[in-house]
Amino acid sequence: DKITEQHVQITKLTKDVEKLTKDLQDKTNELLTTQEVSAVLQQQLEDKDTQLAFSQAANSRLESTAREGKKATEGLAKEHNTELAKLERQVADLRRTLETSEDNLKTLKQ
């Protein structure tokens, strides 16, 4: 009777150990899956950080190019305005010369 009782206890304990072993294996598998997902997410984060760094560098180069372009455009506009003012003065001088010539021509005709 005592042996049967011990046998029942051993069987029960064996089943408990088997269940705990299975639970431990399941939890270990969950942990491994979680670690794998974490590793993938970490890699994706690093990839995004790299993309962000490249984008920031490209943006910085674009801003620099835009500033240089603006300076060059301003310089060309200044040169253009200077040339335009010079041409306007020349046209004004030519108009005065033409008026003087027309006046002289009228005087000669009289």
Image: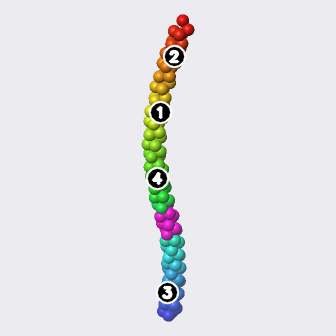
Q: In the image, what residue type sits under mark 2? A: Ser
Q: In the image, what residue type sits under mark 1? A: Glu
Mark earlier in primary sequence (1, 3)? 3
Does the rendering let one see residue 34? no
Task: Find residue 18 and report its horizontal and vertical position in percent.
Answer: 52, 83
Q: Residues within 10 Å of mark 1 (few under 14, many from 20)?
A: few
Dot 4 and dot 2 residues touching (CB under 8 Å): no
Q: Residue beneath label 4, please?
A: 61
Q: Residues within 10 Å of mark 4 (few under 14, many from 20)?
A: few
Q: Residue beneath label 1, please?
A: 83
Mark earlier in primary sequence (1, 4)? 4
Of 65 and 9, the residue lying toward us: 65
Of 99 and 72, the residue lying toward us: 99
Q: CA distance from mark 1 to mark 4?
A: 33 Å
- Look at the numbered disc 3 and give the secondary structure of its residue: helix
Q: Which residues are magenta?
A: 38-48
Q: CA distance from mark 1 to mark 2?
A: 26 Å
Q: Residue beneath label 2, please?
A: 101
Mark earlier in primary sequence (4, 3)? 3
Of 66 and 41, the residue lying toward us: 66
Q: Residue beneath label 3, please?
A: 9
Task: Find residue 42 and report its horizontal and vertical position in percent.
Answer: 48, 66
